[in-house]
Amino acid sequence: MNNQEINRIIIVGAGITGVTVAAAIAKSLPHISITLIGDGDGHSEALSMLPQVHEFHRQLGLDEKELMRATQASFKLAQVYQDWNQTGHRFIQPYGPHGAVTEFVGFQHFATKQHHLGDKTNYAEYALGAIAAENNRFSHPQNDPNSILSTLAYSLHLDAGSYRQFLVDRLLSENVSFNPEGIVDVALDENSGFIQSITLENGEKLEAELFVDCSGKDAVLIEKTLGVGFEDWSGWLPANQVVSIAINSKGEVMPYTQVVGQSKGYLRHVPLLNRIQREFLFNSEEVSTTEAIEIITSGLSPNAISEPQMSEFHSGQRIKQWHKNCIAFGAAAGEFEPIEVSNVQWVQMAVKRFLNLFPDQRCDSALVKEYNRLTELELQHIRDFTLLHYLSVNRNDHSIWKNWRNLDLPETLNNKVSLFKVHGQLASYDEEVFNEGHQASTFIGLGMWPDGHDPFLDAFDLEELKQRFNYMRAAIREAVINMPGHRQYLENYLN
Amino acid sequence: MIKKVVIVGGGTAGWMTAAALSRHLPKACQVHLIESDQIATVGVGEATIPAIRTFNAGLGIDEQEFMRETNATFKLGIRFQNWGELGEDYYHAFGFYGFPINDVSFHQYWMKMQQNSGAAPIHEYNMPYMASVFDKFEHKQFDNDSIASRYFYAFQFDAALYAQYLRKWSEAKGVTRIEGKVTEVSQHPDTGFIESVTLESGMRIEGDLFIDCSGFRALLMNQTLGIGYQDWSHWLPVNRAWAVSTAYENKDTPIPPYTRARALTGGWQWRIPLQNRTGDGNVFSEQFISEDQALDQLLENIEGKPMNEPRLLRFTTGKRDKIWHKNCVAIGLSAGFLEPLESTSIALIQGAILLLIRNFPNEDFDSATEHEFNRRMNIKYEESRNFLILHYHLTRRNDTDFWNYCRTMAIPDELKHRMDVFRHRGHTAHKNSDLFIEHNWLQVLFGQGMKPESYDPRVDVVEPQEVERLLSQMNKDVAQAAHAMPSHLETLAQYCAGDLISNRLSK
Ligand SMILES: Cc1cc2nc3c(=O)[nH]c(=O)nc-3n(C[C@H](O)[C@H](O)[C@H](O)COP(=O)(O)OP(=O)(O)OC[C@H]3O[C@@H](n4cnc5c(N)ncnc54)[C@H](O)[C@@H]3O)c2cc1C
């Protein structure tokens, strides 16, 4: 063992981000003593995760059932977009694949060719995950590659507060402590500029070798202390405020997150076992708080809902996520609209990367540089993919959508969009979160059909392909009929 | 839609391209290939990396037939001699060091154990290494769960025969081969797109898409379209090669399942064992040693009788500024040449073909397609280049000016970064697009003597006795599995060999 290893870590911020980071570090490096400063924020958010969440749980040794019981969780097969491009538009984005790749040729090419020949089959019909979601059915994927059920992929919806508590209960050991006091001072080493200690309101001074900034947009350490700036993306991603309420619900549970376009922003519905968390995302210069509350509560009986909660966010990224002996996660590191990737999901992916590059007390600059390089690539992908969803919106009803249309896009997204338009291929970059099939189905779901298809598709007999995929559609319909309803499945599974 | 593709050049690149396009393009698109008997192919590309199997499988080639017809042998890796220091020997073998424990790479545990000398040398946990040292090979598909099948293989073959094999294959699929030398290329007066090429005979061949496989001369890309070349010889200073075919000394001379790369004074020498002979060559920098000296070295070092006059090849390491321009794509040596140390040329040819297939243009030649192709190819070339530079730069040799130069030269920032990341804790700066991934980098980094300062702290979570037990189990399993394998010769004889191999076995 190297005698410069890290033994003490201070995490500033004990919300879901801080706890996620603490849990991951404590599991991998149990000898390190971790102190979390501050209290957990009291937000009753619902989290809509990606299938990557399973990997995180596996690494922490968490049992799915136990976790789901504790967090009012439900399964997530897809994301459904309603009234998105314009009123009446709807598409389903499942996590499992559409159709099947034919040798080198992705399924989107077959669908594109058929589309231009006048075939109006909904793209979703080629994905079991989409049709199951549409019918509120759920079943775990099966391993047998001959079964259509092997094409399912799923994620989870979780209640943020109880998820945080679950992680606290399971993972924190005698080496992990909480200190709710606020910070009054931070001391730096004169020579290195490394953070040495923090002083709390009660006068207590705490030292550590590594400081983790999970303080949200306050960015107490990374920005307020170390002066690392923030790259603003609000020109690209216009929403900057969210209001949320919980709606009681005892009926069928949607196995998907729903995003509903509105004239002045959009609504998200994240279903949990006995409630639906509804959020309205908008731009605060365009919509007043009162108006936002009106929008989010419209049509709901006041007894069925919770008090609206407001929060702001600021799309953009920290110029360096990791600087000297301080690393930021969560909103302190970057924020984006949660259309496809929630910030908590991103924290899980980021902390895994951090553990793979875990430093010693010197925080070697090569490790720091590598972490920042990878994280920036990943964020760029998340940003571009989020932004892609705005490209097809065809509403004239409000300026949030109108102003948006004349923007210069990031070059990486421009490449993606113009390449896909030619004949449905995807420009690919390192550290992408979503695979090609997922990206292609988003383009298509948004109505951005390519002008042509991969010429190599024409080497296959179209009639044969049509038959094969018609057969697949029938198999999907049949499988869905035999799948249990989502609530019923949850009740059986969790009992 | 593109109706006619014209490939200029019938070397390895030309015929690989013709085969793949004829396999995957719709019938309505014709493929023509022009080659000239007057201009020889390079034809020394004999060693490959495992990716070649994906290519062959994509064509639907029968592996046994292909191996028989190209005198092929199996390749488990490359044996590097005298690279870190004179007298040192290591392998870059196509497999992993041990298994990860608790999601942490094997080598991290090994680095800790090795500090207390509680571990065998790291390559002794690598299956294809152990098979290689005993000249063993068993034909198996990769299986990540079984230590005995956790390896990849490639081939060593006669490149001229491979091109012939693909030619037969392509012609059967409808590719039209035209013999003749291109003497003139005509372009559209406004767009500069290539419209046709004219042969010495006066025959004119028109096309929509032109693929330049004309080798170093880059007839279309450079001579016609004027696309320049990025010279990388300050990083990869070798610029000449003497190549010769050598007979096996006698029928007991082993046929190793690996290529040998022995570092010399001003470059290095390859030895590639085929079924019937070896291919040998000295790759060197003429700035540091003369052509005559290099030839003498080659002949001194070969292990049997030369079967032909040694050939001299001249090249400049580097890459064409653009690999796709207008309606022309360069594939093979016309696109660039790094140097043969890690057998990247055929892999880059294959990479280019696959990217072309994935981004096949339509008649409008949309710039987005060209842009994506060039962007991805640049990454492939640069990453292969960085991996190659590592071999030269990471040396302690100071016995010749050549090695002094390589050891002290400035290297690309990206490579420096990767070495810095490794130096600290043995991590590899990973890229998804790499031709070579973590286990390839690790073998060269460790093989050439780089020692990280410390290891991943997660290693300490597992009890040292437990780590020791797991490591010694893996070590035993690898040795046992290697021991149980048939020899490379036996596998060849049984799987794909011609008379020569059978004769060898019947004593
Ligand atoms: C020393 C050395 C060692 C190598 N070792 C390896 C190795 O181990 N592994 C590996 O993967 N690669 C290796 N390579 C690279 C490999 O040889 C080449 O990548 C491969 O041969 C492809 O060459 P090519 O087809 O691009 O060009 P060439 O083989 O040069 O073929 C050019 C073709 O173009 C035709 N042509 C040219 N001009 C005209 C014209 N005017 N009209 C008509 N036809 C024309 C010629 O007739 C010929 O058919 C090595 C290369 C060298 C130099």
Image (cartoon, rainbow, N blue to C red):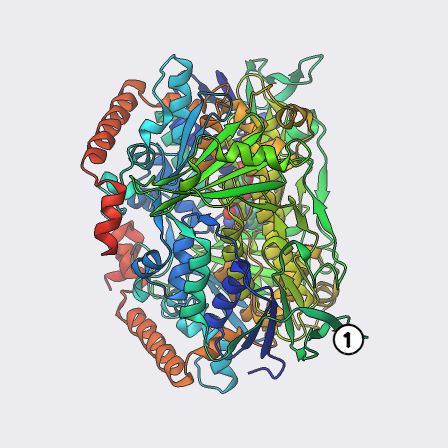
| Label 1, ligand 1: CB separation under 8 Å | no
Which residue appears at 24% of the width and 64% of the height? B507
- From this view, report whether residue B368 is shown above or below residue B406: above
The structure residue drawn at horizontal position 54% and vertical position 50%, both measured from the top left corner, is A343
Q: Residues within 10 Å of mark 1 (few under 14, many from 20)?
A: few
Q: Where ligand 1 lies, by quadrant?
A: top right
Q: Which residue is mark 1?
A: A189
Q: Quadrant of the N terminus of chain A?
A: bottom right
- Viewer-proximal residue, A426 or B507? A426
- Element class at badge 1: loop
* Residue B43 in view, yes or no: no
Residue A402 appears left or right of A20? right
- Quarter in which the C terminus of chain A is drawn: bottom left
B153 in relation to A275, above or below: below
Task: Give the image quarter of residue B428.
Answer: bottom right
Q: Nearer the viewer, residue B383 or A384?
A: A384
